[in-house]
Image (cartoon, rainbow, N blue to C red):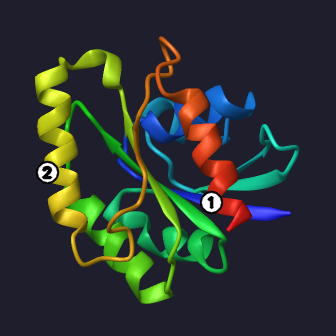
């Protein structure tokens, strides 16, 4: 089985995305649910459209939990790098990218969550900003998909990219 890690924002964007894709809530701890942030590693699994299965490790985004993020990203086949379209790049986005670089992660998909909460002009500005920040990194040129867990926007495209990433 392949393993994909999710790295990104501290809000429930990652957990909600994983729950929407898999039906599994990776946030197990009551404190995680109350605070709206991943504290410890969360786990889920998915069967992709090709029939390929993958485990998903939800890693914390907050700087106080970086050691947990390091444990969750080691040895993964790829990463879903999550950036909330409502907030764009955050300090922890850079921290996660730096860790991915150090660990030699070379495959990933950039996922812009909460696309339904911003207009097209804002989404395009976020897309441009993220692409500029990824220039020269391990995620430069990675597919970027805007998604909404509310409307379903982009979810089929994301699943297709996940299948392609794991096939390579």
Which quadrant is home to the C terminus? Answer: bottom right
Q: Nearer the viewer, residue 33 or 85?
A: 85
Tell me, for residue 14, which label it has, or none. Answer: none
Q: Residue furthest top?
A: 151
Which label's residue is closer to the chain start, 1 or 2?
2
Q: Is residue 83 visible?
A: yes
Q: CA distance from mark 1 to mark 2?
A: 23 Å
Whether residue 29 is visible:
no
Q: Say if 154 sits above or below 69 in the image.
A: above
Residue 139 lies, with reference to residue 33, above or below; the image says below
User: Horizontally, is 112 left or right of 71 in the view?
Assistant: left
Q: Please give the label number shown on residue 129.
A: 2
Please tell me whether mark 1 or mark 2 is closer to you in this view: 1
Q: Position of residue 155 (x, y in %)?
A: 56, 28
Q: Quadrant of residue 101?
A: bottom left
Tell me which residue sits at (48%, 13%) in the image: 150
Quadrant assignment for the N terminus: bottom right
**Circle 1 residue:** 165
């Amino acid at each position: 089985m392949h393993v994909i890690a999710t790295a990104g924002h501290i809000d429930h964007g990652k957990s909600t995305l994983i729950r929407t894709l898999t039906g599994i809530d990776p946030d197990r701890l009551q404190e995680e649910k109350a605070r709206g942030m991943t504290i410890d590693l969360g786990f889920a699994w998915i069967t992709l459209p090709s029939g390929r299965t993958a485990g998903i490790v939800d890693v914390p985004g907050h700087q106080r939990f970086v050691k947990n993020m390091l444990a969750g990203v080691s040895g993964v086949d790829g990463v879903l790098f999550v950036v909330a379209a409502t907030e764009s790049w955050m300090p922890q986005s850079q921290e996660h990218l730096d860790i991915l670089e150090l660990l030699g992660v070379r495959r990933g998909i950039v996922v812009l969550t909460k696309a339904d909460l911003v207009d097209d002009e804002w989404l395009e500005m976020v897309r441009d900003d993220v692409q500029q920040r990824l220039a020269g990194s391990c995620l430069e040129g990675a597919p970027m998909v805007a998604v909404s867990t509310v409307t379903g926007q982009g979810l089929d495209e994301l699943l297709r990219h996940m299948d392609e990433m794991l096939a390579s």
